[in-house]
Amino acid sequence: MGSIGMKMPDLSELRAAMRGRAVVAEARVVLADRLGCHEAEALQHLIWLARDLGMELEDAASLLIAHSPAGADVPDLPADAELMRRSVEAAHQAYRTVEAAAGGGEPGTLNEPGTLNEPPAVNEPPGRPAEADTARPLEADTARPAEADMESDARLLEGTPEDPVAQAVLDAALGSACLLVPIRAVDGHVVDFLHAAFGAVAEDIFGRSPEELIGRRLLRTDPGSRLNGLFPAYVEVLETGRPFARGPFDYTAVHHGTSRIVQLSIRCVRVPTGVCLTWRFHDEEERLRRRLDRSERLAKIGFSEWNLATDEHDWSPQMLANYGRLEDEGPLVLDELPKIVEPADLPLFEQAVHVLFNRREPVQVEFRIRTPDGANRHLWLYAEPTLDRSGLLTNISALTQDITSRRSMEGVLAETRRDLLRLQGETARERQVALTLRRAVLPPDRVLAGAPGVSAAVRSIPAENTARIGGDWYVTRVLPGGRSMFAVGDASGHGLAATADMARMRNGLLGLAYTGEDAGRLLSWLNDLVHDVGPATTGTAVIGHFDPETRELCWAGAGHPPPILVRDGRARLLEAGGEPDPLLGAFPGMEYRTSTVRLRSGDLIVLYTDGLVERRGTDLDDQIDMLAGIVVSHGGELHQMLDDILKGMALDRFADDTTLFALRVR
């Protein structure tokens, strides 16, 4: 026996929540397969269906799963986040490679203005890692150039003559432009360039101003230009005079440990004092283009322009895709469109064309087409005319959206709704049958009438939710010899099957009760009956015998919540020693134990099913403690006490069956 305050491990609430989530998850996959959409969108449709039909989400999900083919799969969507992550990682790896290479690639130091000595070979001291130089931060050299370099660079910049040609290029450039003068080694080959002048508009990838860059070396401010081939290209322009152009292309640069990638176009020409660069960033243009392309693709919206004066047709890639056209096939002309429109929709399409050209008004129309590959598509078209000042029609702008998946989804949803309505009706009829069977099997609330030494009362309430009607049952009998037998049980599952199992358990116990055997023996026989006869099932039960002569209560339990004994204003649980005996039907040939307790006048025994104490988000032991507290505080008539218990426990009539039995010793 144990006290009410003891905590009994119970996972039923967690398991129930997990089952509910699993049912909804499986139904989401099934519906996503039927609709051809992503699981998240399918879940939203499932929620709407359940709300529209006045059903719980889990109940609608259960119906959908029970009447859907197994093995539904949902096509995977592109893993944009993963691609982005990998791209970023790859970019950062590239930046680290650029930094390492550039950090160790300093060609040397200037000796005379415009010339450079090659760096001498240095033997590394023992124990120094070979990669130490390449791991050095890129800006270490950039931020702290040799004093000789700074002096010689200043002399080179000061000695650069005026260059009218270079200035004309800088002044004429529409975008960023600069003049680079060469820095040569002793043998005359170019080892770097010096920023000598900038145009009126100059935009650096890192936002550095011309004042910050004038007088600084190209390979120190932009070491990536050596690795990506730009620096050799500038040298070739200087030496050959042939202009250089590249772009747009992806350009990577590093500054103070920060790497950036931009879309860039570059032009380079030779001038008397060096080379002039002009460049332009395409980031904003590229971003807008990608955004438009992505919007067209995701929404399946295509755009087109038809110049009536030149008869030129301009279709976006998605416009071609909506009509099943390849890029090399080009747009359809107006005379070809009726050939692919479904005959049933052709009058509507022709009416729209008439309004557009004759009345010169915008039109909206939905129609179906058959593409060259034989696919049927639903298209929504919006077209608008453009008129010149004299009112003549000069241009047609059109937008077409492929709404095939939407129309298909609407059809599947309508069919699914019809199926759920049918299943809801079938479930309602099943509930009615279950309730009728329950009323036929279970006796009225008047129990143990005329039993010597005791008075009793019972409440047995079926769930209001159609799908949650369970297998709660109870039995009371006055046996030959004056003993009172009472039992409360619960067959696993819900619905008509659980009600049938309940009737089998209860009627089996009624027949076994007249053998005169103790409660443990009756449970052992009932266990074999549940296991061997009829469909396999499980259940819980607690059986008690009260002898009015000895005032002994002999009881046994099979996986059922323990009875509560109230004596002298205190409550405790009746528990057998050791581990509780298992569920009925779980183990054939199981021998159940019988426990005995001597009762006194005024003692109260309370039996109940899990529907009274199990609640989502609450601890089972806390709920049993609450039940015991209500029983202890109530000293009135039994029927009133049971009603007050149901009210005090905030009974959820929608969730599960509930049975509550009380016996008081006189």
Image (cartoon, rainbow, N blue to C red):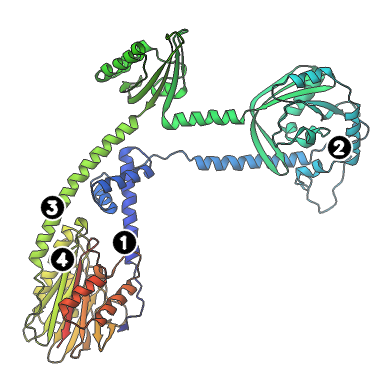
The label nearer to you, 1 versus 4, is 1
Between the residue at mark 1 and the residue at mark 4, the CA separation in whole angstroms equals 21 Å
Q: Which residue is mark 1?
A: 16
Q: Which residue is mark 3?
A: 429
Q: Is residue 578 in sight in this rendering? A: yes
Q: Secondary structure at mark 2?
A: loop
Give me the C-alpha separation between circle 3 and circle 4.
19 Å
Horizontal side of 22 relative to 141 (left or right) equals left
Q: Give the mark nearer the N terminus: 3 vs 4.
A: 3
Q: Check disc 4 and give the amino acid type.
A: Met
Label 3: few (<14), some (14–19) or many (≥20) C-alpha neighbours in 10 Å: few
N-terminal of the pair, mark 2 or mark 3, is: 2
- Which labelled disc corresponds to residue 108? 2
Label 4 belongs to which residue?
A: 502
Disc with the residue nearer the chain's start (1 vs 4): 1
Residue occupying image coordinates x 77% and y 41%: 103
Query: Pointers 3 and 4 in contact (CB under 8 A)?
Result: no
Q: Residue at x 22, y 59 (%)?
A: 468
